[in-house]
Image (cartoon, rainbow, N blue to C red):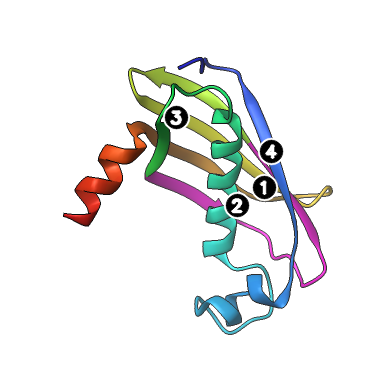
Amino acid sequence: MDIVAGQESGVELTVTDADTAQALGSGDVPVLATPRVVALAEAACVAVTVGRLGPGDTTVGTRVDVAHVAATPVGGRVWATARVVSVDGRRLVFSVRVSDGVAVVAEGTVERVVVDRERFVRKAAA
């Protein structure tokens, strides 16, 4: 594993009807849903790890603490960035931020753990 504090990456999203609180059942308004914001933040964390894990390894989410503070309408674009804050053995802590280019939409922390993909899937299926 070649992951150290300070590494960062990001992903972007143009909000569609499928990304809204109405579509995801987390509310009844046509704006970017909080569950989608969390998924986007986690995708940014995963992007940091691409090419930096050992053979057969992956990461799984274990904790999310994200404040969703601004609404984004359908058609709006948001960017999620994740930065490694700490590495403790197989435990990775990221700071995450989602922004629309003008304002912060969400921010917080995400924890993920490095696991052996095959063993993890096998245990989950048992």
Query: Within the magenta stretch, is there residue 32?
Result: no
Tell me which numbered mark, 3 or 4, is placed earlier along the sequence.
Answer: 4
The quarter of the image holding the N terminus is top left
In this view, 27 is above or below 39: below
Q: Measuring 54% from the left and 76% from the top, which residue is drawn there?
A: 24
* Amino acid tagged 2: Leu
In 3D space, how far apart are the residues under numbered discs 1 and 2 (Cα atoms)? Answer: 8 Å
List the residue tagged with mark 4.
10
The amino acid sitting under disc 1 is Val
Q: Which residue is mark 1?
A: 98
Query: How packed is label 2: few (under 14 Cα within 10 Å), some, or many (20 or more)?
Result: many
Label 3 to label 2: alpha-carbon separation: 16 Å
Dot 2 or dot 4: first in sequence order is 4
Give the alpha-carbon distance from disc 4 to disc 1, as whole Å: 9 Å
- Residue 70, quarter of the rendered image: bottom right
Q: Quadrant of the C terminus?
A: bottom left
Q: Which residue does the numbered mark 2 point to in the structure image?
A: 40
Q: Residue at x 32, y 32 (%)?
A: 116
First in residue order: circle 3 vs circle 2: 2
Q: In front: mark 1 or mark 2?
A: 2
- Label 2 and label 4: CA atoms lie apart by 9 Å
- Given contact means CB atoms under 8 Å apart, are the residues at marks 1 and 2 in contact? yes
Side (left or right) of 76 relative to 48: right
Residue 120 position in % (x across, y down): 28, 42
Task: Determine whether label 4 and label 1 are within 8 Å by CB.
Answer: no
- Kindly report which numbered mark, 4 or 1, lies closer to the viewer in this rendering: 4
Q: Tell me the kind of residue under disc 3.
A: Val
Circle 3 residue? 93
In magenta, the rendered stretch is 62-81
| Element carrying mark 1 | strand
